[in-house]
Amino acid sequence: MEVEETPEAVPVAAPAVAAPAAPSRRTPRGARFAGAAEEPEQPRSQQPLDEGAGRAVAETVETLIRLRREGRSGEAHGMLVEAAYWPPARFPLLAAELHRAGLDADWAALLWEAASLPAARLVAAADALVAAGRTRDGHQMLRQGVVRPAPEIGEAVLALTGEGRRREVRALLDAYVRMRTPEEAARSVEGDPQRLVPLLLEAARGVSEERHWDLVHALRVAGFTA
């Protein structure tokens, strides 16, 4: 009597099998707005506002209303650039007050300005928004924030890892592998492939099996061991 042994399927560490080979696993969980069940999306608890936050926000909104009324858009934009560097805990309050004043376009502009913040501040600001219930704004800020040169992402991840800030690393890379092509993402590991490749692959696997294999392929084409 013959006993047929079914060979075990070798999962992720398979050789160079064609990347798209995970057919019926769709790209899951809404790539643009990740579900709250994913660990990288869990924010820290809401940060307390600093003492002068309420007054600073009120004065800024009043000034913006006046500048917009007078057609002084250059000065208004300058104020938004400054506000992008405020303590992260102020962002939810500022968002609420700008929307209340009908300055939705100014809030959108502020989100865009915040995208150029250093990585740690970017994640902290996005966290503050998510913790205050402004999840969509927080995710948008992260998505816009990863549209920067690949080497900068790699440097930021290495710096955050060196400080032991694993949660920020996961949040940043989760947004990064969702927004950038696998080929672009592969370029971010050049600074330290040994440390960056595993982190990048872990983030891609959290998005979908398909994205993980696409990244494995892109890394191999770029000459990195995946």
Image (spheres, rainbow, N blue to C red):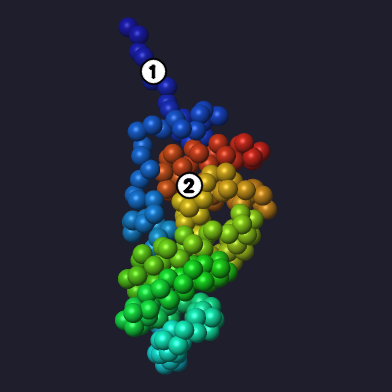
Q: Quadrant of the N terminus?
A: top left
- State which tag comes first along the sequence, 1 or 2: 1
Determine the residue positioned at 68% across, 53% down.
191
Please tell me which residue lies in front, 38 or 211. 211
Query: Looking at the image, do the residues carrying marks 1 and 2 touch, with CB atoms under 8 Å apart?
Result: no
The residue drawn where x is 46% and y is 42% is 211
Q: Residue 11, located in which quarter of the rendered image?
A: top left
Q: Nearer the viewer, mark 1 or mark 2?
A: 2
Callout 2, which amino acid?
Ala
Judging by the rendered image, the residue that carries numbered circle 1 is 5
Where residue 24 sits: x, y (%)?
A: 35, 33
Residue type at mark 1 is Glu
Residue 38 vs residue 167: left or right?
Answer: left
Q: Distance between the residues labelled 1 and 2?
A: 33 Å
In this rendering, the answer to whether 24 lies above or below 146 is above
Q: Is mark 1 on a helix, strand or loop?
A: loop
Q: Position of residue 214 (x, y in %)?
A: 50, 39
Callout 2: SS: helix
**Quarter that holds the C terminus:** top right
Task: In this rendered view, identify the residue nearer to me: 1 or 193.
Answer: 193
Label total for image: 2
**Residue that carries the numbered disc 2 in the rendered image:** 204
Label 1: few (<14), some (14–19) or many (≥20) C-alpha neighbours in 10 Å: few
Q: Residue 45 occupies which quadrant of the picture?
A: bottom left
Q: Position of residue 88 (x, y in %)?
A: 47, 77
**Residue at the spot x=49%, y=62% of the render?**
144
**Compared with residue 119, is residue 10 higher up or lower down, i.e. above or below?**
above
Which of the 4 image quadrants contains residue 93? bottom left
Residue 109, image x and y in percent? 46, 72
